Amino acid sequence: MTKRHTIHSRARTAMVGIVTLTIVAGLVPETGAVDVAIPTEPRRPSPMQDHPAVTNVPEQHS
């Protein structure tokens, strides 16, 4: 009984964690950290592609 309850509690905690990560990913889609934490979204392979102008600024000045 005790072991069965412990396994169920762990599974339930894992589900809550997954749901929380999914909600956070949905609320903050523009953060690069979310893409790193959740590699299942192939929208942005690298955070540098989000701001190509900012990346090219130092190259133009130099």
Image (cartoon, helix red, strand yellow):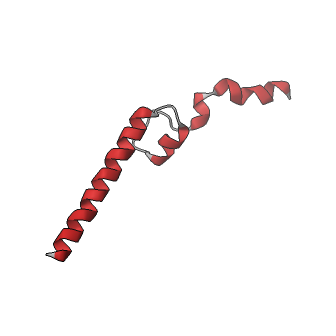
30 in relation to 5, above or below: above
Residue 8 pos. (x, y %): 20, 64
58 in relation to 35, above or below: above
Horizontally, residue 12 falls left or right of residue 48, namely left
Residue 45 pos. (x, y %): 51, 38
Please name whichever residue, 36 or 62, is drawn nearer the observer in this view of the structure: 36
Please name whichever residue, 15 or 44, is drawn nearer the observer in this view of the structure: 15
Residue 16 pos. (x, y %): 30, 51
Residue depicted at 47% across the width and 47% down the height: 37
Horizontally, residue 1 falls left or right of residue 37, namely left
Please name whichever residue, 55 or 22, is drawn nearer the observer in this view of the structure: 22
Residue depicted at 53% across the width and 36% down the height: 31
Residue 41 appears in the rendering? no
Quick one: quadrant of the N terminus? bottom left
Name of the residue lying farthest toward the left: 1
Name of the residue lying farthest toward the bottom: 2
Kindly indicate the quadrant of the structure image that contains residue 56: top right
Quick one: quadrant of the C terminus? top right
Name of the residue lying farthest toward the right: 62
Q: How many marks?
A: 0
Residue 54 appears in the rendering? yes
Residue depicted at 43% across the width and 45% down the height: 38
Horizontally, residue 49 falls left or right of residue 35, namely right
Residue 59 pos. (x, y %): 79, 29
